[in-house]
């Protein structure tokens, strides 16, 4: 499981120096008393995150329960008195791993933006926002870990800002840390004094993070515009930022194609593309909803649909498919964006074809969208099988399909929509009932009774499946 973590997550979110980790790793099993709390927590969180892609770690398995307890323990340790063993690089590494694990395992995964405030403040308190050249002398390895960790924190921050629709808490003027060097972990250690970074087009253990950093400035600007109370979203600015994101996706695709033989995996490509491309949908949604009335915004409608279809057809990879079926937070929000976008587009297309009388004769485009809707519905059911308890998603999609399948919108009565919704609810009920029968009963003193899954947190805030969240001017019902 630790190997899976370093193969899949670490190349994208640079948190640890791999040789250092593996040097400490055997002590957990051979001489655990020799390890301090931070070393143990790092290893357990790495194992836990890697277990999310392990075939035996089902939604109600004993292993998953144990990983959740490790996450709670890490959060409790981070919340303790700010002693020296917390306010340092090791403490920040544990904080980053915990933020990632919370979203993977739905432990308050939709509320990480609040915790990211603490993380970014701690990082700035110890100087990560300043490049090492401005700080007291440190080793080459320490400087590289410093830079990698800072940009990992920024990446997690902009993702949480996008998901929470809240400000990112930082601007480009608040830091001057240089990008990390394009160098492999095994090429530097504490004794290294001189290194020769590889060319940017060369694949190394840091190369995927550098691909994300290239678009970080544009994505930070996007969340500032979307979530700022006094920001004005001018369309020309939207087009400029959209071009930056599209160019970044194309550059990453080319980099992956050029470095297949060097070790780039399908998971790494899918993951990086997902983290960057998903910014296009909320950026264009306010204008895409106006495209019916103002054809000048048809480009926004095209961009949101293409981004959604890209989500639904990543390069085949079992690990990435499993992550999208189990994760919350930033891993679930892409699914929510896609569902709202496809739902809006299929309703617009169906109504347009009803109006011009081609609903029965020109079915190719509408059938394509319906198939995408069926794929999303299947994914929503799979997410419920894998641990999610929010059944509104598949019910929402089923109701939209009822409207889209009717040649006469006025003939779509409430009974038809209710029947589709009921069929979806029955299936969800059967899935949840099967999970409940298979899950072991917790004891009265089991701490898991007091824990809550992050999958329900959005509903507590009123952010449930609705076209209004993404398309506030939609009137298609």
Image (cartoon, helix red, strand yellow):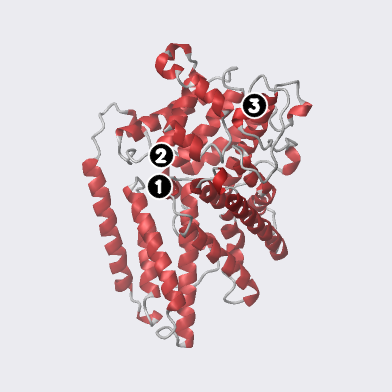
Q: Quadrant of residue 83?
A: top right
| For residue 149, side relative to residue 359 (left or right) | right
Measuring from the top left, give residue 4's x and y in whole percent. 45, 36
Q: Nearer the viewer, mark 2 or mark 3?
A: 3
Residue found at the very far bottom of the displayed protein: 357
Query: In what quadrant of the picture does the C terminus appear?
Result: bottom left
Q: Give the mark toward the camera: 1 or 3.
A: 3
- Residue to which mark 2 is pinned: 52
Residue for badge 3: 188
Which residue is at 45% across, 66% downward? 343
Q: Disc 2 versus disc 1: distance between alpha carbons?
A: 8 Å
Query: Could you tell me which residue is drawn at 73 percent across and 38 percent down?
Result: 174
In the rendered structure, are the residues bearing label 2 and label 3 in contact, judged by CB atoms less than 8 Å apart?
no
Residue bearing mark 1 = 322
Q: CA distance from mark 2 to mark 3?
A: 30 Å
Single out the residue that lies furthest toward the front.
261
């Amino acid at each position: 499981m630790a190997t899976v973590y370093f193969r899949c997550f670490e190349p994208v979110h640079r948190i640890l120096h791999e040789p250092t980790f593996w040097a400490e790793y055997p002590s957990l099993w051979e001489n655990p008393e020799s390890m301090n709390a931070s070393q143990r927590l790092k290893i357990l969180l790495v194992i836990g995150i890697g277990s999310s892609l392990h075939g035996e770690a089902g939604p109600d398995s004993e292993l998953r329960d144990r990983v959740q307890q490790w996450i709670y323990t890490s959060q409790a340790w981070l919340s303790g008195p700010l002693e020296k063993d917390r306010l340092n690089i090791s403490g920040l590494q544990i904080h980053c791993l915990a933020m990632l694990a919370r979203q993977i395992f739905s432990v308050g995964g939709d509320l990480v933006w609040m915790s990211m405030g603490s993380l970014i403040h701690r990082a700035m308190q110890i100087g990560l926002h300043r490049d090492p050249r401005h700080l007291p002398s440190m080793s080459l390895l320490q400087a590289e870990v410093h830079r990698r960790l800072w940009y990992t924190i920024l990446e997690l921050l902009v993702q949480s800002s996008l998901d929470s629709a809240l400000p990112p808490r930082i601007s480009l003027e608040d830091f001057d840390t240089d990008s990390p060097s394009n160098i492999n972990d095994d090429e530097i250690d504490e004794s290294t004094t001189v290194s020769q970074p590889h060319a940017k087009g060369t694949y190394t253990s840091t190369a995927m993070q550098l691909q994300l950093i290239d678009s970080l400035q544009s994505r930070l600007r996007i969340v500032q515009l979307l979530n700022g109370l006094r920001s004005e979203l001018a369309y020309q600015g939207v087009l400029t930022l959209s071009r930056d994101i599209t160019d970044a996706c194309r550059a990453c695709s080319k980099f992956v194609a050029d470095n297949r033989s060097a070790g780039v995996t399908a998971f790494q490509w899918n993951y990086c593309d997902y983290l960057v491309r998903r910014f296009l949908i909320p950026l264009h949604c306010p204008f895409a909803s106006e495209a019916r009335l103002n054809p000048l915004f048809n480009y926004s409608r095209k961009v949101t649909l293409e981004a959604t279809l890209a989500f639904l057809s990543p390069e085949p990879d079992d690990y990435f498919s499993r992550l999208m079926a189990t994760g919350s937070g930033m891993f679930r929000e892409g699914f929510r964006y896609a569902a709202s976008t496809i739902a809006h587009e299929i309703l617009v297309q169906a109504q347009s074809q009803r109006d011009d009388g081609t609903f029965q004769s020109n079915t190719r485009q509408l059938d394509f969208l319906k198939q995408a809707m069926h794929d999303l519905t299947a994914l929503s059911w799979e997410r419920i099988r894998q641990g999610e308890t929010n059944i509104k998603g598949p019910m929402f999609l089923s109701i939209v399909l009822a409207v889209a399948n009717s040649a006469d919108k006025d003939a779509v009565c409430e009974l038809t929509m209710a029947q589709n919704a009921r069929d979806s609810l029955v299936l969800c009920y059967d899935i949840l009932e099967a999970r409940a029968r298979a899950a072991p009963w917790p004891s009265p003193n089991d701490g898991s009774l007091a824990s809550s899954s992050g999958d329900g947190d959005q509903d507590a805030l009123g952010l449930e499946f609705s076209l209004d969240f993404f398309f506030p001017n939609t009137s298609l019902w």
